[in-house]
Image (spheres, rainbow, N blue to C red):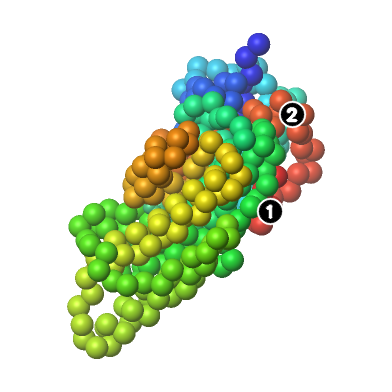
Amino acid sequence: MNTYILAIESSCDETSVSIIKNGAEEISTVVLSQMDTHASYGGVVPEIASRMHVENITMVIEECLNKASMTMDSIDAIAVTYGPGLIGSLLIGLMAAKTLAFIYHKPLIPVHHHAGHIYANNLVKEMEFPLIALVVSGGHTELVYMKEHYSFEVIGTTLDDAVGEAYDKVARVIDLPYPGGPNIDKLAKEGVASYTLPRPLDDDSFNFSFSGLKSAVINLVHNEIQRGNEIRKADLARSFGDTAVDILSKKTMHALKKYDVKNLVVAGGVSANRWLRNRLTEECEKEGINLIIPEMKYCTDNAAMIGAAGYFAYKLGRRAVLSLNAKATEPLK
Ligand code: KG4
Ligand code: ZN
């Protein structure tokens, strides 16, 4: 018997709804990005994000069902991101999911946003266990050990800034438009790594620190401006990107060795980064590690990944009551 999950994601600036079959097959997904609106402010404005979710959520649900040529009758359960994220944004998706669950008498499945990012990999290929997941987004940088489905042991995390946040701040200081990560990624292609930058927490632990690296770039730019020197933006983007990718890759490969794991999955917005993808692909080939990195469209926020995670949560009997609340911060579980 096939299981169809209708999933809703609205934790930040994407209103997205998806229907996923058996946790692995995408039937239809609609992603309505607010990026162009927020770009003029240089970052996501939470109040605007919530309002846009309100305006769009019903339409996105309808469009997703229409695209799939399905009705709510054939849906087995509703999965929804309940956190972490912007509280106002989360609440809109959550209210929509609760309403559907209530009216159509469907189970409501709570999905942690990062579990969603990890399970995006199951849409590419069936995930095999045990595995290490590298979760790299605008809000988090984590190494997670998974012995089996839905067992998350966070073995390392950032002690300060998330790597995506560092990308965005560095982009801003060299006047690249929001969102910064993809623009640094692109500009780095034209540069050489000629700036020397610090490598915070470059040790054997699985924790990360990106605030020192970010501040070093910001200070360097300010000092050069004060001295009247020109900033070689492409070189700086390349130097910063190379340093960040090198730290992420080294720690990930070290975790695979220490935990004697042969499977690596990569998740979160920063996994769209071409340098990180290339470096991990190379290293994993060398070490005989099975690597899955989601297609670009599954790297940034989308509801397909919530549908994939939601399926396994559903199979494990996870259910939410209608009083489920949104959580701005929440440990991975
Ligand atoms: O997972 P995501 O879409 O939202 C969060 O849950 O945070 O990740 C967004 C982050 C942003 O910081 C963005 O700049 C970064 O992912 N990002 C990238 C790239 N594409 C998105 N960072 C580096 N290189 C990219 N190509
Ligand atoms: Zn995300």
Residue positioned 41% across, 72% down in the render: 198
Query: Where, quadrant-wise, is the N terminus in this rendering?
Result: top right
Looking at the rendering, which quadrant does residue 288 occupy? top left
Rendered view: 159 above or below 272: below
Specify whether residue 38 is in view: no
SS at mark 2 in the image: loop
Q: Residue furthest bottom?
A: 227
Work out how far the residue at label 1 is from the one at label 2, CA to CA, in angstroms.
20 Å
Looking at the picture, tell me which residue is in the foreground, 128 or 178: 128
**x and y percentages locating residue 43 in the rendered image:** 44, 62
Looking at the picture, tell me which residue is in the foreground, 68 or 177: 177
SS at mark 1 in the image: loop
Local crowd size for mark 1, using a 10 Å CA cut-off: few (<14), some (14–19), many (≥20)? some
**x and y percentages locating residue 63 in the rendered image:** 48, 28
Residue type at the position of mark 2: Leu
**x and y percentages locating residue 140 in the rendered image:** 55, 56
Specify whether residue 182 is in view: yes
Looking at the rendering, which quadrant does residue 281 occupy? top left
Q: Which of marks 1 and 2 is in front?
A: 2
Q: Which mark is residue 330?
A: 1
Query: Where, quadrant-wise, is the C terminus in this rendering?
Result: top right
How many labels sit on residues?
Answer: 2
Residue positioned 53% across, 36% down in the render: 263
Kindly identify which residue carries mark 2: 316
**x and y percentages locating residue 105 in the rendered image:** 75, 25
Residue positioned 21% across, 86% down in the render: 228
Asked if residue 187 lies left or right of residue 218, the reply is left
Residue type at the position of mark 1: Glu
Earlier in the chain: of badge 1 and badge 2, it is: 2
Q: Does the residue labelled 2 lie within 8 Å of ligand 2?
A: no
